[in-house]
Image (spheres, rainbow, N blue to C red):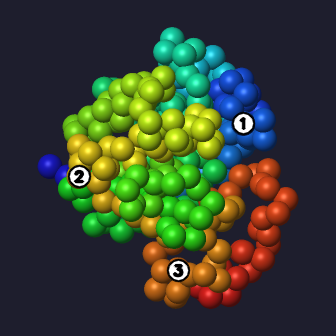
Amino acid sequence: MSTSYALIGAIESEFNDTNVNTGICDACKRRLESEAIECFSAWRAKAGWLKDIPIYAVCPTKNTISVSTKKAFEELGVTYIEEYQEVVETFTSGFLNIPLVGAMMEETLLEDVLIKIDLDMSIIKPLPRELCNSSQVIVGQYDDYCTKHQRAGIASENPFDTGFIISKRNTLFYKHFFEMCMQYMHSEDPDWLRVRNQTGDYYLEEYVMDRIYANKTFDISPIQKYQVGEWYTPVKELSDLELDSVYFWHEHLEYDPDYNKVREKIEFFKRTK
């Protein structure tokens, strides 16, 4: 029997999400619905052999999406799931929706492989088959350039980012990920407190990913330099070989004014045309 795949993503409403409501990031008023439409439109157009796979957008909170976005999802063949989870009322970070939704999909879906991307990521070209069929869990990791602007990782490892994850559904990777996030949310672990003192709970779920990797609980294969965009490694810092392995633009619709979006796109397309 052939392997089946699904694209999954956590979503909340435009300018109204858990990060805003918890006050964890006053600058994080995101156009999540608009970004999701762009994300899924790009996937349907440019994901190649994966472009027609099922896409699931899941809202586990009371910050549900608009009727117009639901219609746009229908037109894109995106399955929208609105399933309130009471546990979200305890969240100190909206990014905890990532492992929660992943765990929900592990229980609900039938597809073999779950591909998770952030809603502000637009695919540029198809993902390699060997990446999607890996026996390991594929997880994004900040490269040396990005790490300079991030929290410190565990031991000598660069910290992980949870924007891009590929996992086998039957491993229950997200179930473990979510349970660890809930464990660390109020943990007095000194290493977590070191990070929390720097950034609050903003990087909680990414710190937990660092910890899962350090504990070797799952066989995680880090992937770096798979994306370009807002505050990721600039195109000029990437070799031609590295550019060939870039699969996503990653930038918010309302991006930081110090990010030169036009320059980055010109530089990228000049070198990859």
User: In terms of depth relative to the viewer, which is nearer, 150 or 125?
Assistant: 150
Report which residue position mark 3 lands on.
243
Q: Secondary structure at mark 2?
A: loop
Residue found at x 51% / y 31%: 96
In this picture, residue 147 sits left or right of residue 207: right
Instruction: Examine the rendered structure and indicate whether residue 101 appears above or below residue 83.
Output: below
Identify the residue at horizontal 52%, vertical 31% (top origin): 97
**Lower position in the chain sequence, tag 1 or tag 2:** 1
Q: Could you classify mark 2 by the number of other residues whose Cα lies within 10 Å: few (under 14), some (14-19), or many (20 or more)?
A: few
> Counting residues from the N terminus, which is met first, the one under dot 3 or under dot 2?
2
Q: From this viewpoint, which residue is outermost toward the left? A: 1
Residue 64, given in percent of the width and then of the height, sits at: 65, 23
Which amino acid type is marked by label 2? Asp
Question: Mark 1 belongs to which amino acid?
Answer: Cys
Q: In the image, residue 45 lies at what x, y percent?
A: 56, 60
> In front here: 95 or 144?
144
Q: State the residue position of label 2.
A: 219
The image shows residue 237 at horizontal and vertical percentages of 60, 81
